[in-house]
Amino acid sequence: MSVTVSLFSRHRTVSSRCGNMFQAVMRLSASGARSLARSRPCYSAPLASRCYSHGKVETDEEFDSRWVTYFNKPDIDAWELRKGMNTLIGYDLVPEPKILDSALRACRRLNDLASAIRILEAVKDKAGPHKDIYPYLIQELKPTLAELGISTPEELGIDKL
């Protein structure tokens, strides 16, 4: 019985300590909440503006010429063509006709008609709800498409599938 009592008394001591610790925490948190609720003068330091990019900003013309140069590489392979188009389509823009012209010419150099049609489909999808962008691009690319013998998805009837 003495063992049980000593265990019980030890348990009671621990629980009373826990109770005291709990009360202390509650007391401190209540005083902390009161101190937060008090109105103190607010001194805010000016926010530092951070510049995360140390590179120069690329202009639209530089962007276009970079992609035209990429697709005009004479030794471009099918993987590089797909990689470039996937990267280009991933941007928040619809590519300019001169970029698409060089991409379509790269498809012709590779004899890859499927990629050329996929490029046109991707551009149509990228234009989204802006119904005037895709017809403009097709109008601008019409001479190139005729020269290279590439039909549009609409001419092939695959836009209705």
Image: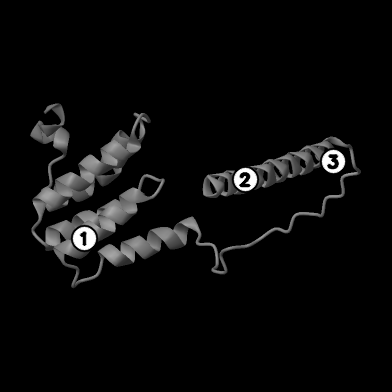
Comes first in the chain, label 1 or label 2: 2
Q: Residue drawn 24% across and 56% down?
A: 103
Give the spatial CA distance, label 1 vs label 3. 63 Å
Amino acid identity at mark 2:
Ser
Q: Position of residue 126 (x, y in %)?
A: 32, 40
Picture quadrant of residue 49: bottom right
Picture mark count: 3
Asked if the residue at tag 2 contacts the one at tag 1, i.e. Cβ–Cβ closer than 8 Å, the answer is no
Q: Is residue 139 shown to the viewer in this render?
A: no
Q: Which residue has dot 2 on it?
A: 9
Comes first in the chain, label 2 or label 3: 2
Q: Which residue has dot 3 on it?
A: 35
Quarter of the image with the C terminus in it: top left
Relative placement, left or right, of 77 versus 32 is: left
Relative placement, left or right, of 154 versus 21 is: left
Name the disc covering residue 95, or none: none
Comes first in the chain, label 1 or label 3: 3
Q: Residues within 10 Å of mark 2 (few under 14, many from 20)?
A: few
Q: Secondary structure at mark 2?
A: helix
Q: Is residue 105 shown to the viewer in this render?
A: yes
Q: Secondary structure at mark 1?
A: helix
Q: Nearer the viewer, residue 25 or 59?
A: 25
Q: Position of residue 73 (x, y in %)?
A: 24, 70
List the single residue furthest toward the right: 41
List the single residue furthest toward the top: 160
